[in-house]
Amino acid sequence: MYSLTTTKMCSKSFIETLLQRAQLFADGKEPWKCNGTVVNVFFEPSTRTNLSFQMAAHRLGLHVLNFDCTNSSLKKGESMLDTLQTIEALGANIAVIRSSEDWPAMELDKKVNISLVNAGSGVKDHPTQALLDALTIKQHFGYFQGLTVTIVGDILHSRVARSNIDVLTKLGAKIQLAGPEHYKADDLATFVPWVDFDEAIEESDVVMMLRVQHERHSEKFPYEIGEYHQKFGLTQERVRRMKPNAIMMHPGPVNRGVEIADEVLEDGRCKILQQVRNGVAVRMAVLEVCLLGERYGHLVSA
Ligand code: CP
């Protein structure tokens, strides 16, 4: 039984294999049709991740059930573990879980006998987001070694930042962080450099903007929107100072006029919708490996 709960469990070669398989799907390769049922269990709102897991499952020929967390027996006090064991007993093969809790706190994968895929948990892990971001970077540059990736914004509350740091560092990119000092993360401070955004913009190959995650803030947001945008947003003026071949990314959803100016979203170097497209291909590769387990290696090398 293969589960993907964090990128920390993924070696560089496994990530490369997943990206290679995902690229085939992005190029339109028809997958082997798989048998099985995927259950989407989303405790937090999601558009991209939820729909692209559904799309990926349909393209693989899988059945999809969407678990309604707001109208389930969780509301009657059933635990998450009992819910997943019920999903397993019903005959599902994979549960895709989005949660506001950090995954290790749940320790679910050790207690059920179905594949579990982390669709974003707490502030630490969003493995499929980092994989689709890596695929987007690879499609543009063809390599990772030596690329400078600057991740900008609400780093403290960002699982996207943490998963990307893990994946892109393994692949050979140099990561640096920028944004409000208020949202610096102590757990990252010792191994990822903190830089001035306005200096970093000129040397970056990838500028990855993050959403301000108000839903995770315990304190009042200390900026006016316009002030935040001027200090830490991707304005047209900053885009003009980027390297000609540099790209802009954002995991979505975007708060227009906060992290990114409206006009910048129209720029051809802005890869946000390419990231969404790649989400389907990457999630196909992840669901496939969950279903095939050890046989996956043979499939990829075939
Ligand atoms: N990037 C991301 O996880 O978006 P959703 O919350 O819409 O799934």
Image: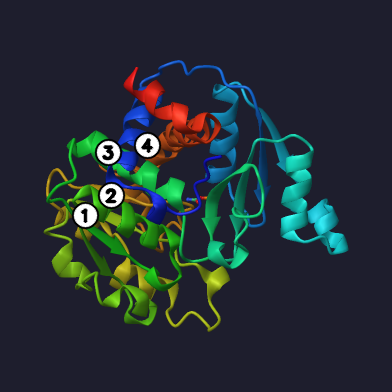
User: Earlier along the polypeptide chain: callout 4 or callout 1?
Assistant: 1
User: Earlier along the polypeptide chain: callout 2 or callout 3?
Assistant: 2
Residue 251 is left or right of residue 52, and the answer is left
The dot on residue 61 is none
Residue indicated by mark 1? 239
- Contact (CB < 8 A) between labels 2 and 3? no
Depth-wise, is mark 1 or mark 2 nearer the camera?
2
User: Earlier along the polypeptide chain: callout 4 or callout 3?
Assistant: 3
Depth-wise, is mark 2 or mark 3 nearer the camera?
2
Q: Is mark 4 within 8 Å of ligand 1?
A: no
Q: CA distance from mark 3 to mark 1?
A: 12 Å
In the image, what residue occupies the spot 54% across and 64% down? 104
The dot on residue 268 is 3
Q: Is mark 2 within 8 Å of ligand 1?
A: no
Residue indicated by mark 4? 274
Work out which residue is located at the far right of the displayed protein and give it.
76
In the image, what residue occupies the spot 38% across and 28% down? 297
Q: Secondary structure at mark 1?
A: helix
Judge whether 78 appears above or below 25 on screen: below
- Contact (CB < 8 A) between labels 1 and 2? yes
> Residue 288: x and y, percent?
50, 30
Q: CA distance from mark 4 to mark 2?
A: 11 Å
Residue indicated by mark 2? 248
